[in-house]
Structure formats: structure tokens, C-alpha cells
Image (tube, helix red, strand yellow):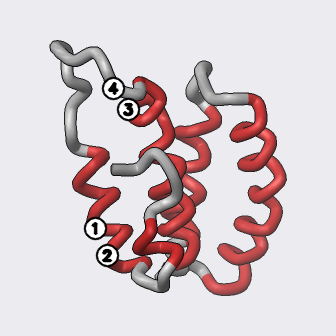
Amino acid sequence: LVASPPSHAQKGGNEKAYLLLEKALAIPFPSDTIYVMQTLYEYKTLFFFAEVSFRLGKYVQTWEIYKKLLAISSLLPEDRDYLERRRPQLAACIAKFGSR
């Protein structure tokens, strides 16, 4: 479902992607499967949800998601760096636009 950036988000359907990802976040980690990407449950879905939230102008929500993501010890270094680089831009958006 979310192994790569949501195709809805890439094609301008951010609202659809937001709803899909919101539902995906509520799916519990399956205990009886072998071929499940654990990172999807640990943080990737949340990471993509943050990206879509940002595109929709939900800057305060995005900030809160970034804080959650940065608190995850298993977050890949490159994902952590990406979030740290985006934080100043996000803070500027919050200061200028607030959150929709």
C-alpha cells in the first residue's frame, strides 16, 4: 500500500492519499505473516502521511508528525536527515500560514 510515495499524491490526489494513509495508520501490525515490511508499521506510513499533510497545508499536524518520527529510534539516518532539513521550511510555513 505505501512502500513508495502514494501515487495519489504524485498525481494531485493529495486528499485521497491523506484519507488512505490515515486509514493505513490504524491497521495493526499482523502477527502471523512473513512478508510484511516492518518499517511500514514502524514509520514509513507515518512518513508519507507527513508529506501529504504538508502538501495539503496541514503544517501544524505535519510538525507533530515530524516530532513523532524523530522520536523513533529505528528511523533510517537518511530519513532523519531529510526531516531535520525540512523542519526550518515547515516552521516558516507555520509562522506564515498557520495550519488549514
Expressed as whole percent of the image width and height from the top left, the position of residue 34 reads 28, 15
Identity, as a three-letter code, of the amino acid under mark 3: Tyr
Q: Earlier in the sequence, mark 1 or mark 4?
A: 1
Q: Earlier in the sequence, mark 2 or mark 4?
A: 2
Marks 3/1 in contact by CB < 8 Å: the verdict is: no
Marks 2/1 in contact by CB < 8 Å: the verdict is: yes
Q: Please give the name of the residue rendered at 31% of the width and 75% of the height, measured from the top-left corner.
A: 16
- Find numbered disc 3 in the image and state the secondary structure of the residue it sits on: helix
In the picture of the structure, the residue carrying the numbered disc 2 is 16
Identity, as a three-letter code, of the amino acid under mark 2: Lys
- Find numbered disc 4 in the image and state the secondary structure of the residue it sits on: loop
- In front here: 97 or 15? 15
Identity, as a three-letter code, of the amino acid under mark 4: Val
- Find numbered disc 1 in the image and state the secondary structure of the residue it sits on: helix
Q: Please give the name of the residue rendered at 70% of the width and 40% of the height, measured from the top-left corner.
A: 79
Q: Earlier in the sequence, mark 3 or mark 2?
A: 2
- Tell which tag, 4 or 3, sits nearer the viewer: 4
Marks 4/3 in contact by CB < 8 Å: the verdict is: yes
Judge whether 66 appears above or below 58 on screen.
above
As measured in the structure, the alpha-carbon distance from the residue carrying label 3 to the one carrying label 1 is: 17 Å
Q: Earlier in the sequence, mark 3 or mark 1?
A: 1
Identity, as a three-letter code, of the amino acid under mark 1: Leu
